[in-house]
Image (spheres, rainbow, N blue to C red):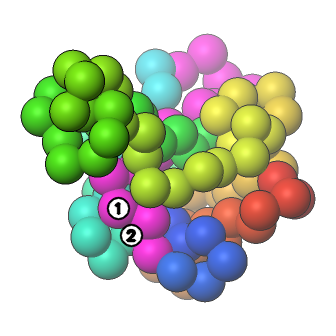
Amino acid sequence: MRGVVTLEGEPIADANVTLVSVKENRRPAYGKTDAAGRFRTDEGVPPGEYKVVVTVPTKLGPQSGPLAAKGGVEPSPYILHVNYANARTTPFVRVVPPAEGQIKLDLKQDGS
């Protein structure tokens, strides 16, 4: 399964995308976005309805920001609404396989 993730129309890099089956007790499928916001899941995704969760991890290790100079953690440049980080609250439910050939997710600042 492949798709693209944007925030208010702009691509989100390094986001984790998880597809969680709505009805079946299936293993979730995982993917990570590239610089253009594109992702591909780690393996084939069986047909069905899925909730899509999107998170952006905090970046660890040497960074160039003020926290890094003190040995701290630099946050991601993207701030996503908490709704997107949980299968119970995500507004994104998609059918696999998608009619368009890929999943398109345009996240909003307000979490809708």
The answer to whether the residues at label 2 and label 1 have Cβ atoms under 8 Å apart is yes
Task: From the viewer's perspective, tell me whether residue 99 is left or right of residue 12.
Answer: right
Question: Looking at the picture, does residue 24 appear above or below residue 8?
Answer: above
Is 105 rendered above or below residue 33? Answer: below
- Say which element carries label 1: loop
Bounds of the magenta segment: 11-26
Name the residue located 18 percent from the left edge and 42 percent from the top edge: 63
Residue 1 percent coordinates (x, y): 38, 57
The residue under the point 79% across, 40% down is 83
Q: Quadrant of residue 13?
A: bottom left
Where is residue 54 shown, x and y percent of the image?
A: 56, 45
Please, what is the three-letter code of the amino acid marked with disc 2? Gly
Q: Position of residue 16 (x, y in %)?
A: 41, 42
Residues 95 and 57: in front is 57
User: Label 2 belongs to which residue?
Assistant: 37
Residue position marked by numbered label 1 in the rendering:
13
46 magenta-colored: no
